[in-house]
Amino acid sequence: MNNGGARRMNGGGEEDDDEDYVNGDLDAWERTYTDERSWESLQEDESGLLRPIDNKALYHSQYRRRLRSLSSTATAARIQKGLIRYLYLVIDLSRAASETDFRPSRIVVIAKHVEAFIREFFDQNPLSQVGLLTIKDGVAQCLTDLGGSPESHIKALMNKLECSGDSSLQNALDLVDGYLNQIPSYGHREVLILYSALSTCDPGDIMETIQKCKKSKIRCSVIGLAAEMFICKHLCQETGGTYSVALDESHFKELILEHAPPPPAIAEFATANLIKMGFPQRAAEGSISICSCHKEAKVGAGYTCPRCKARVCELPTECCICGLTLVSSPHLARSYHHLFPIAPFDEVPPFSLNDPNHKLQRNCFGCQQSLLNPGNKPGLLVVCPKCKGYFCLDCDIYIHESLHNCPGCDSFRHSKADKE
Amino acid sequence: MKFQIEDVTVYFPYDHIYPEQYSYMIELKRALDAKGHCLLEMPTGTGKTIALLSLITSYSLSKPQSPIKLIYCTRTVHEMEKTLAELKLLHNYQIKHLGPQARILAIGLSSRKNLCVNPTVLAAENRDSVDAGCRKLTASWVRAMAAENPNVPTCQFFENYEKAASAAVLPPGVYTLQDLRAFGKEKGWCPYFLARHMVQFANVVVYSYQYLLDPKVAGIISKEMQKESVVVFDEAHNIDNVCIEALSVSVRRQTLEGATRNLNRISQEIDRFKATDASRLRSEYNRLVEGLALRGNLPITDTWLSNPALPDDILKEAVPGNIRRAEHFLHVLRRLVQYLRGRLETDNVEKESPVGFVASISSHAGIDQKTLKFCYDRLHSLMLTLEITDTDEFLHIQTICDFATLIGTYARGFSIIIEPFDERMPHIPDPVLQLSCHDASLAIKPVFDRFQSVVITSGTLSPIDLYPRLLNFHPVVSHSFTMSLTRDCICPMVLTRGSDQLPVSTKFDMRSDPGVVRNYGKLLLEMVSVVPDGIVCFFVSYSYMDGIINTWNDSGILKEIMQHKLVFIETQDVVETTLALDNYRRACDCGRGAVFFSVARGKVAEGIDFDRHYGRLVIMFGVPFQYTLSKILLARLEYLRDTFQIKEGDFLTFDALRQAAQCVGRVIRSKADYGMMIFADKRYSRHDKRSKLPSWILSHLRDANLNLSTDMALHIAREFLRKMAQPYDKTGGSDRKTLLSQEDLEKMGDGSVHEMLY
């Protein structure tokens, strides 16, 4: 019979005296930490210094990403993706955001990673726009309107990090719905809510608001910082978003960055349609003109709208005068890699290195560093399935996350073209 | 899926089975083979009901030469419907695989209130009035009268049913109460009487505990069940209390006043009959002289509640001479009521044995034991003779007669306790005379004796060795199963100290300590800020809950709690509580979050589920011991010690812990669910208390969670909730297999399943 539990209890000893066990059992709580023996995973190198142990974690996160991209390519080679995204980032600044279970506090952690996210987001989605919203004292406020400039968003956010009051999901959704309803139909409407609170104080029926969001095709995703809430789960399920809860800071970072690559397009929007865009030229250096976005005179370094000749400071944006979408061609090109991702590299089992066929490739194709660990032991490495070039892990991450081109494939293609 | 257990082919309607369900079936099968009784504990949410149903029906199918009948007892109508719905699914599956030979008849049986389709009768508000309303239309004399005078109203449904006579049968199939009503409406037959009739022929009968345990009801409903039956008591952790209540009677001042009114009415009726139809009374007298208490076979509509004593204890003798005449019987009853009224007017608590009480009755009121014993049958006969149909009016005199018959019949296992006031409110006189049964084995003995196998099962039957002693039977199988989980989705904790390291407890000398009250408040306050959606709190009693909520209110803790979650409170008023529960659910749904304050042993603790987001955390404040100064409890403890050698402390702890387990078990209703349980009392960390919790809770109670203070618990809660919010693989991966497919079962022998579970 299963009295294993009971037997274990016996082992804990009888506490007949009411007061006796208080001291004896205290270390039981500490025991979980003792059991993990986290200090044993520390290692010393030859010179007696502690070797950093985050290698594993790094490798793991990379592996995760690889799997993810693998699955997305496996399901459908040509998934239509929403490249033009209009994302509202809702940041919960209620009382709960000032809690200190994330160090130094939730809101500081959130701000830090939101900054990284916004940069990453524009890096991956140059055609998209972001707006910031905060919830504080039960009211949702618009911090920045939709726009394409990471700096202005980050600056606006960093100035407003005081937390107080309750949180209201409904108010935030209503506000977002009002804003996103106006954007053109080719854009993907998205909300990402960073929710610290565990409750929502709403003025009305939130279920109606959720239905409204569903009707306006707004994809709502939530990242919780404390625990799973039913209403958030419901919201995400209804609107096709994802719901996740962060375990700790690094997990939170991972979760928020998962929202940077564009999501698959919603079926209703999948019909191809043409979008009018302008490709403005950079204005001459030294010329003085009044920029239309900040309404102040600036010297040089601006762009001129090809239709109305107004001056704007940054790309991509929408012209304030004629409403034309202004982008630069590299932006468009950069968005392409989502549609044609490079295949994930295969892991090479270490023993095959001893194979005489592979003797030539002792160095990483990307960085030309030796692929062998100190002591001539083979380290972990990967191989591109197309060009069969070997890469170290650092290059693997760099190629997949920043470069989006395989140097091996590209150089081979060039050399082939040269020959012909 | 379909698989073999020894020589039985089991048809199971789902594609996968939990390993514990499989071993549950194996144990159950052994008990059936041995034709003995068994005790099985398996946590809720593991599909107990379907495992039971599919094994027993498959067992019956595989042995067509000796078909067994399944009698399935549930506690509530809701559970009855759920069981029947599940059976329906199973039945369809079996028909699909076996063809028409798998056809069975399965019906649910409930009171008229749940089965009646006559709109005029159904308009009555409570069960007794519906019963009376039905009798008014269907009693044999009413129908006889209606045959002569068409203006006398009768029930059309019943008339049609009678007319159809032997043609009125249910075709094979599974009928829930709703199906029965629909069938009745369609055919124009009375579903209640149809169901009562079909109970004898059905392969599966689902009804309430009372129909087997309460001799008053069992005598008319379950009299003709065959011996080759398997009786299942589901959710049977409180079965001893049900047994005891079935044989206990309490008499209050209102009862006596009502009884006097009833007697006056009866005497008027007698006078009326004397004037108009004296022959009826005379013929009754003659019948009683001949020694027939009842008129042989009564029409089904005239049967009333039957004798409150157990069938073996009823004397098959003639009614004593001094109560054969109606007037004389009436005098005896008047004297009895008078005597009881005298006994109620006392200033002290009195406790007496039935023997002493009967002796005192016979010396003061001149009624001897044998007369008392026959009171019930005599009243029944008289009411029939007088053609009284509004039986709901006569409940009071009926209670008195129940009481008289029981004290006349039993000398052991009972005691009579008279309390002039409720101990908790000594200023309000509320005298009550209670005949309380102490021996749970009395009421259930006929069930054990009569039926081949009795299965007692529940999520909380720990310690499992106590039940055979309490109910006085010998199980051939008694087993407790754990849950195989894909992840550790329950997190029990024992909290012994507040954040200031002072111990917390609801021990009598500590419970009103402001430090304890404050620490409990702080615990809840901290928890509402880290736990999403619903939290349920159980207190040891209503008075303690009222007290602690008042203190929290005064110290502002309640207000702070309300900033995070709304607060709902269970009250003794059913309607109010239902409303509170409804709003609680809405608050959980819309994300506002809510706390529900409830009481262990209350209605909510017993029957309401707080699954999924309706209960992410349950806090048990204190150990829910019974009110130990209660005279009834003391008498029962004394009896248990003398008769069954069960120590007082053991029984009290057992009873408290099963209530606690019942309360905390409310949060987990399926494996996909998750929840935390906090036992907030320092006494839980003692081994003798803790070890009585069911093994499925104990196996998750890690050493590290045993002696926590508030801040530690808070930390664990945070970690647990984050962990649980992560996506997981439902089938449980390769190392912890929690879902078995047909191939898995075929691949492995019994051995490997056992290995996995134990």
Image: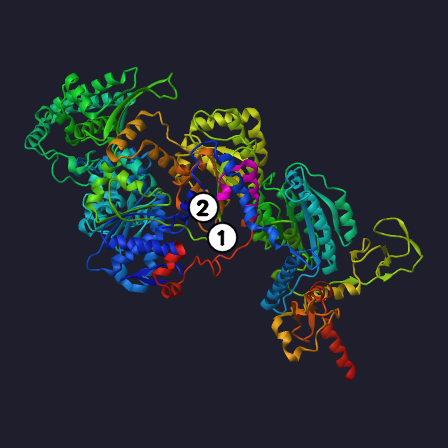
- Give the mark nearer the N terminus: 1 vs 2: 1
Residue numbers of the magenta segment:
B700-722
Residue toward you, B681 or A294: B681
Task: Provide the chain ID for the residue under circle 2.
Answer: B
| Image quadrant containing the C terminus of chain A | bottom right
**C-alpha span from label 1 to label 2:** 13 Å
Q: Which residue type carries mark 2?
A: Ile
B324 left or right, relative to B252: left
**Can you see residue A63?**
yes
Magenta span contains residue B707: yes
Residue toward you, B497 or B178: B497
* Magenta stretch: helix, strand or loop mostly: helix
User: Nearer the viewer's eye, disc 1 or disc 2?
Assistant: 1
Q: Is residue B230 above or below residue B660?
A: below
Q: Is residue A156 above or below residue A72?
A: above
Q: Secondary structure at mark 1?
A: loop
The residue at which mark 2 appears reads as: B668
Task: Provide the chain ID for the residue under circle 1.
Answer: B
The residue at which mark 1 appears reads as: B487
Q: Secondary structure at mark 2?
A: loop
Q: Which residue type carries mark 1?
A: Arg
Query: Where is residue A296 drawn, in percent x and y?
Result: 88, 48
How crowded pointer 1 is (Cα within 10 Å; few <14, some 14-19, many 20+) is rated as some
Magenta span contains residue B614: no
- The image's mark for residue A104 is none
